[in-house]
């Protein structure tokens, strides 16, 4: 058959060992029996996880939904693409941007409260 010829004195091919059913790792999740679930944490992905939900979002579901929405030109109109990717602050090249003052930080800290997100939306 295929792969068995090789001339005189050729070695016979090794047979692949089959994984025995008893050596499979135990399954903790429900689902198909032929699927093996890896429950180990990915250490490299840890640096990309966040502890709290970012400011404009109020729940984890809102934040994840915003991440699922694509930002590219292929999925959005040109106008919406430019609105979504537009920078918040626009300055001319070479202009000096003053650092944030302590007063501004205090005002921002006072605005954080239970209803601060509702006030800013209006």
Image: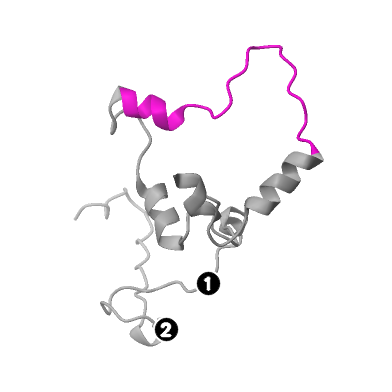
Residues rendered magenta in the picture: 79-101
- Residue 7 sits above or below residue 39 on the image: above
Rendered location of residue 51, percent (x, y): 60, 62
Q: Residue furthest bottom?
A: 22
Instruction: Give the main secondary structure, helix, strand or loop, of the magenta stretch.
Output: loop
Quadrant containing the N terminus in the rendered view: bottom left
- Residue 43 sits above or below residue 96 on the image: below
Q: Nearer the viewer, residue 107 or 63?
A: 107
Rendered location of residue 21, percent (x, y): 34, 84
Q: Is 96 colored magenta in this rendering? A: yes
Q: Secondary structure at mark 2?
A: helix
Chosen colour scheme = one colour
Rendered location of residue 50, percent (x, y): 58, 58
How many residues crowd around disc 1 within 10 Å: few (fewer than 14), some, or many (20 or more)?
few
Rendered location of residue 74, percent (x, y): 29, 29
Q: In which quarter of the view is residue 89 placed?
A: top right
Q: Which residue is mark 1?
A: 40
Is 44 situated left or right of 84 in this image?
Answer: right
Is 3 situated left or right of 47 in this image?
Answer: left
Circle count: 2
The residue under the point 47% across, 26% down is 86
What number is the disc on residue 23?
Answer: 2
Is 42 situated left or right of 62 in this image?
Answer: right
Q: Is 82 colored magenta in this rendering? A: yes
Q: Secondary structure at mark 1?
A: loop
Q: Residue furthest right?
A: 102
How many residues crowd around disc 2 within 10 Å: few (fewer than 14), some, or many (20 or more)?
few
Q: Nearer the viewer, residue 4 or 62?
A: 62
The residue under the point 31% across, 23% down is 78
Q: Earlier in the sequence, mark 1 or mark 2?
A: 2
């Amino acid at each position: 058959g295929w792969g068995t010829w090789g001339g005189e004195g050729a070695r016979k091919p090794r047979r692949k060992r089959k994984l025995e059913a008893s050596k499979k790792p135990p399954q903790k999740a429900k689902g198909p029996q032929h699927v093996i679930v890896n429950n180990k944490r990915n250490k490299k992905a840890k640096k990309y996880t966040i502890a709290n939900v970012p400011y404009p979002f109020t729940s984890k579901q809102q934040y994840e939904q915003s991440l699922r929405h694509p930002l590219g030109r292929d999925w959005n109109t040109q106008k919406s693409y430019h609105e979504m990717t537009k920078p918040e602050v626009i300055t001319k090249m070479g202009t000096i941007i003053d650092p944030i003052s302590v007063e501004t930080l205090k005002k921002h800290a006072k605005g954080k409260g239970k209803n601060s997100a509702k006030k800013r939306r209006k």
